[in-house]
Image: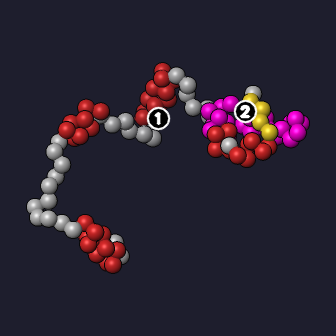
Amino acid sequence: MEKVAIAKLKNELSAYLESARRGEPILVLDREVPVAKIVSVLTPVATSSEESDIRLKRLESKGIIYRGDVSRMQALLKLAPIKPRRPVDLTAAVLSEREEGR
């Protein structure tokens, strides 16, 4: 369990919360006296790729997520970008949309 002084915790709160999110409890000290413990309310994130794959398969089977096909994405990225038929002033187009309230 990691120990941290209140002042350091305030300065680096995001980093300590990320540690807690990963499942590592944080003991908060006030002048070397423990006053609080920070623990994640979430299930710790899987640490190995095998655990991650199992978790992703479970979520996909429940219909919570859909994993895309990498080969399709790579094929799309290889396509040439679409060129407009005529020159377009993007700034004017954005300003026009803003005026129309879109």
**Quarter assignment of residue 99:** bottom left
Q: Mark 2 — residue?
A: 25
Which of the pair 36/5 is nearer the observer? 5
Q: Is residue 48 above or below residue 56?
A: above
Can I make out residue 74 in this image? yes
Which of the pair 55/91 is nearer the observer? 91
Secondary structure at numbered mark 1: helix
Q: Please name the colour scheme applied to the rendered image.
A: secondary structure
What kind of residue is marked 2? Pro
Q: Quadrant of the N terminus?
A: top right
The location of residue 21, given as percent across then percent down, is: 63, 37
From the viewer's perspective, tell me whether residue 83 is left or right of residue 69: left
Secondary structure at numbered mark 2: loop
CA–CA distance in space, label 2 to label 1: 26 Å
Q: Mark 1 — residue?
A: 59
Q: Which mark is residue 31?
A: none
- State the extent of the magenta-drawn residues as a range: 17-41
The location of residue 77, given as percent across then percent down, is: 23, 40
Can I make out residue 54 in this image? no
